Image (spheres, helix red, strand yellow):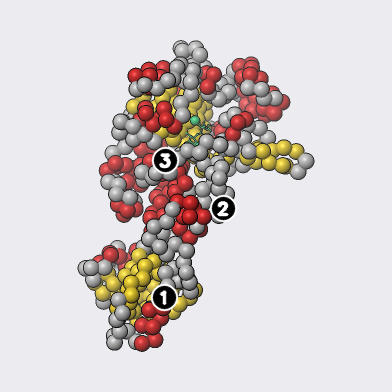
Amino acid sequence: MPFQHVKDILSGKLNGNRRVKLRGWVYLKRDLGDLQFILLRDGTGVMQTVARKGVTNPEAFEKARKAAQESSLIIEGSLKKEKRAPGGFEVLIEKIEIVGSSDNYPLAKKSHGVEFLMDNRHLWLRSPKQRCILRVREGVVDAAREFFRREDFVEVHPPMLTSSMVEGGATLFQVKYFDRKAYLTQSSQLYLEALIFSLEKVWCLAPSFRAEKSRTRRHLTEYWHLEAEEAWYGNEENIKLQEKLVSFICNKVGENYQEELETFNIDPKRLCTVKPPFKRMRYEEAVSKLQRKGFNVKYGDDFGSREERALTIDIKKPLFVTNYPIEIKAFYMKEDPDNPGTVLCNDLLLPEGYGEVIGGSERETGYEKLVKRIREIGESVENYKWYLDLRKYGSIPHSGFGLGIERLIMWMLKLQHIREAIPFPRTPDRIYP
Ligand code: 4AD
Ligand code: MG
């Protein structure tokens, strides 16, 4: 007899009153003496199963009684409609096989401190809530891939080991590369810039690394970075592409992950109604707004989590902040010819206090300007020779952006901390498990 999946049964693909064969793990056990309830969890959902004394054969009843939380089981039985069971079905156990026992499961208790849960992340991931996050995460990536295919972008695969920095030396991880120094990439941007000369519109999803010492709720040292680079696009087209992408991802997840959203008490409408245009604000307006709110910031200061939170706490739509001063942004951003001293760039801030999810900009194309800015940040021009070549051989206007996948998921599911948006989070304090 073939195995069935819980989702197929609960979705009504299989009718009641028939034999089923399931395999999975004991999510919850309730021992009522003559009744042994086992909530069996597989990769797709949770099914109530029950052994009844006097009805279930004694051998199977005894195994059901013994089956401990998170032991793995194969259960055969008859499927019945049961209003009181989660999902509306129940399996009356006829045969049961304990595949792997599970004594003293560390997460058996109902509540645990976060540190304990993080130390047991490899087990915590089994919980239905964590499974929902992982599924939504897949939905986000799926939607992004669909979006870029529709928009005629080519997916590319840049290196993670690099010879130079992109986003500033302060957050660079250095690794020993045989007898030389190398770095873990902070962003694939420079490589995407090279690839547009071959493919015009490219995107990638790859890990980026930041040696961020900041212990905030939204920083990881390793995160998944969705980046796009577009030949011939100006800053405005780049911004429009970002709002279209974010709306597309939100709408898709809102439509296709209602059950998962419900688990987090999120009305799918919150995601289904995200649509362009997003709000916009220039950096200098943002500074004034913060000053009115009592922040001690002045023109030229960069924004951190607190400032971004204040800017977005009372808005419902994502917000683009544009035209940051050139001094506080990366060397590759193009100066705005109409507003010298500022760059053609945007940060996209998520509403409800969540803050930055995207950094984007039009790229500087002037060879001499780039050389000057590379020198200003104290880098060796020699290391960027290949990058500067792109400005020597058929240079074109172009733009691009990078989106932090975990930040987006965090907002979508209203997670308190970014660490739950990735299976095995890396932070300054944690590289285990
Ligand atoms: O703003 P950032 O540093 O921009 C870049 O890296 C550009 N080179 C991207 C590009 O234009 N191709 O990073 C982009 C995004 C941020 O907006 C944020 O969502 C995410 O990456 N991010 C982080 N996510 C989690 N933990 C961290 N430490 C992050 N640092 C950046
Ligand atoms: Mg940024």
Question: In the displayed structure, does residue 255 sit left or right of residue 322?
Answer: left
In the current view of this chain or complex, which residue is farthest to the left? Answer: 83
Q: Residue at x 39, y 57 (%)?
A: 111
Chain-order first, disc 3 or disc 1: 1
Q: Secondary structure at mark 2?
A: loop
The answer as to whether callout 3 falls within 8 Å of ligand 1 is: yes
Out of 315 and 230, give the one closest to the viewer: 315
Check disc 2 and report the residue beneath it.
Answer: 432
Image depth: mark 3 or mark 2 in front: 2
Q: State the count of labels.
A: 3
Kindly report the distance in space between the C-alpha atoms of the residues bearing marks 3 and 2.
24 Å
Which amino acid is tagged 3?
Leu
Position in image of residue 318 (x %, y %): 35, 32
Check disc 1 and report the residue beneath it.
Answer: 67
Question: In the displayed structure, does residue 254 sit left or right of residue 322?
Answer: left
Chain-order first, disc 3 or disc 2: 3
Question: In the displayed structure, does residue 203 sit left or right of residue 378?
Answer: left
Residue 19 seen from this side: no
| Quadrant where the C terminus is found in the figure | bottom right
Q: Residue at x 41, y 75 (%)?
A: 67
Check disc 3 and report the residue beneath it.
Answer: 408
Position in image of residue 311 (x %, y %): 37, 27
